Amino acid sequence: MQDILDAIMAAEGAKDPARELAGIGGLAVPESYQGVVVRADEQNMFDGLASRDRDPRKSLHVQEVPTPELGPGEALIAVMASAINYNTVWTSIFQPVSTFKFLQRYGRNSELTKRHDLPYHVVGSDAAGVVLKVGAGVTKWKPGDQVVAHCLSVELEDAAGHDDTMLDPQQRIWGFETNFGGLAELSIVKANQLMPKPDHLTWEEAASPGLVNSTAYRQLVSHHGANMKQGDIVLIWGASGGLGSYATQMALNGGAIPVCVVSSPEKAELCRRMGAELVIDRAAEGYKFWSDEQTQDPAEWRRFGEKIRELTGGEDPDIVFEHPGRETFGASVYVAKRGGTIVTCASTSGFMHEYDNRYLWMNLKRIVGSHFANYKEAWEANRLIAKGLVHPTVSQSYSMAEVGQAAYDVHRNAHQGKVGVLCLAPEEGLGVRNTQMRAKYEQEINRFRGQ
């Protein structure tokens, strides 16, 4: 592993980094590597505890694991950096289900997928690094390529996937529903997960947008999602968070008008730094959409809607960008304009949503479900990053040894933007190849730092 890292580090500051990395494919692949795992024999460790009381620091472990066989159409990458997503939190607290059920199901597909059904699960759905080896049939990518990986793993053997790969019945999220994820020194991905690493970013910055940036693109911009247009008023929950911070940037870039909902003055300030003018601090306003565990309070929906209209000059949101789920969904359906769209992914506050259907059907509103992104959408989202039109939102980075704490912080919503993880990278700040472009966007790249 040290030889691999030395080869990658030799490209730092080189006039021709690609040339320095060209020979990396000739290096021996280690028989094992360090990865962040959950263990099958611990999947019941939190039984009886509420979600908020489940502690990722107890369930996420760094351990040596065997390097898996490389299959056709796959690539082995040396992972320089990764990031924490909510799916890693869900994996670590074994909710809503243990991910070992996903691995068992995938393992039944074929002789090759049996590799994934193991008593440990190497987690993580983001990665930036260098291609080490490619499997049979891979022609677009070669050893030495500097890449980021999106998290859609799809077999594409069913006709249903060839219009939109997210509809493929064998579509899975890599590192969540498959093994060999990105929070590790090495990772296996399908070649059609790879995209060029934006060359003005560090490894940890390049790794961090993948899942959330692509998700926000499909949810908000794509015709498969809300199909946002210029002038749309877009209500964005958690607008300074890992997902919302990208939705906020896309709304602004696309000529829409974001109404950013946050939970502190610090988060409100981050939204303003991104260029948003209309911000609601829900904690300062004291919104309580539920009067108790079973009962929502429509009066609070109305009060929230009045605040939105106060900011927008009397207009309701054309689009509600939903991901908190249970806590906010009733309010989201209520405040969307007549004929508006509530586009939803995830459910960080609970999966069982409740809303008053009168406000949906009688006002011709739509609920659109959105899940990650297809390769085209992920590629377009990554292109926005590479062009400097959307910027990473890394607030801090952890080592692999500190992943439990990083996931705990995300679970507790004690973070801003995205939390990066250094894998093979020995320190932050490495991997920049285009210093001129970086200098142009330095302030935007670093606006979440230290938050």
Image (tube, rainbow, N blue to C red):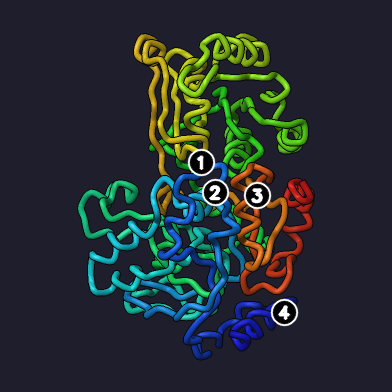
Amino acid carrying label 2: it is Arg
Q: What's the distance in space between the residues labelled 1 and 3, CA to CA? A: 17 Å
Q: CA distance from mark 4 to mark 1?
A: 51 Å
- Which tag is nearer the camera, tag 2 or tag 3? 2
Relative to 32, say whether 398 is above or below: above
Which amino acid is tagged 3? Asp
Callout 2: SS = loop
Q: Nearer the viewer, mark 3 or mark 4?
A: 3
Q: Badge 4: how crowded within 10 Å, few (<14), some, or many (20+)?
A: few
Three-letter amino acid code of the residue under disc 1 = Ala
Q: Are marks 4 and 2 in contact (CB under 8 Å)?
A: no
Q: Which element type, helix, strand or loop, lies under badge 1?
A: loop
The answer to whether 101 appears left or right of 78 in the picture is left
- Which residue in the protein does label 3 denote? 409
Q: Earlier in the sequence, mark 1 or mark 3?
A: 1
**Gap between marks 4 and 2 measured at Cα:** 46 Å
